[in-house]
Amino acid sequence: YEVLGYLEGGNKMEVLLVAVKKEIVNSFADVIEAAGLTPAIIDVDYFAMESMYETNYEPQTAGEVIGLIHIGAHYTSINVLSNGISTFTGDLPVGGQEFTDSLRRAMQISEEDAEAFKIAGLMNGDKAADLEALLRPTAQSLAEDIQRTLSLYGAIASEEGIRNIYLTGGGAKVVGLTSVMEERLGVP
C-alpha cells in the first residue's frame, strides 16, 4: 500500500492498495535469487512503468492525463496517470507475439523467420515484402483493443481526456505501430 494523500485536515487518507498472488511474487523472487541476487523490492508492472516515466520525463502539469502502454511479448499493460497518480490500469492478452504469428501465417514461414523479419525488416538479408503493410491489420486490432480499454477510463474519468501516450516494451518497436496508434486514438 501507499498513502497518496490526506483529506479533511488529516482525518482521512487516500490509500493505494495493491494485491498480488503470492505465487507470482515468489516466482519473480526465485528468478532473482537464481541469478545470485537478493530481491529488495518487487514492484507491480504498472507502477514500475509509472516510476520509469517519472524518472525520465518532467512532472505532469495540473490536470494533465498521460497514458503509459507497455507492449510485451504476450500481453499489453495500460496505466493512466492523472496529476501524477495512477487512476486506471488494465491488461490486454495481446502483445508482440501476435505480430510474429500474423507474419508467420501470412508468409507461411517459421516462427523464427517471422520474428527475425519483424525485428530487422529483412528476410534472408533482403527486403522481402512491405513489412508495415503486413503488420498493419494486427496493429489496427491492437489499437482498437487499447481504444476500447481506454474508453472504460473515459467512462469513469471526470477530467479531460488523455493528452499523450508513451509506448514501451519490445512490441512498441513494431514498424508502423506508432502511426496506427496515433491515428486510431487521436493522441500523440
Image (tube, grey):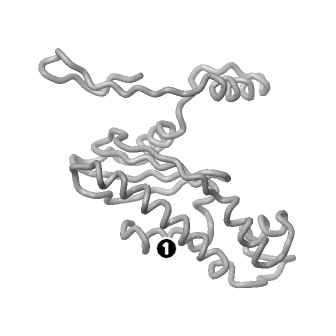
The answer to whether residue 37 is left or right of residue 91 is: right
Identify which residue is drawn at 61% across, 51% down. 75
Viewer-proximal residue, 181 or 90? 90
Viewer-proximal residue, 143 or 45? 143
Q: Quadrant of the C terminus?
A: bottom left
> Which residue is outermost to the top?
11
Residue 178 position in % (x across, y down): 51, 68
Identify which residue is drawn at 43% across, 72% down. 184
Viewer-proximal residue, 17 or 125? 17
- Asked if 129 appears above or below 174 in the picture, the reply is below
The answer to whether residue 52 is left or right of residue 155 is: right
SS under mark 1: helix
Identify which residue is drawn at 31% across, 55% down. 154
Residue bearing the label numbered 1: 179
- Asked if 7 appears above or below 113 in the picture, the reply is above
Amino acid identity at mark 1: Ser
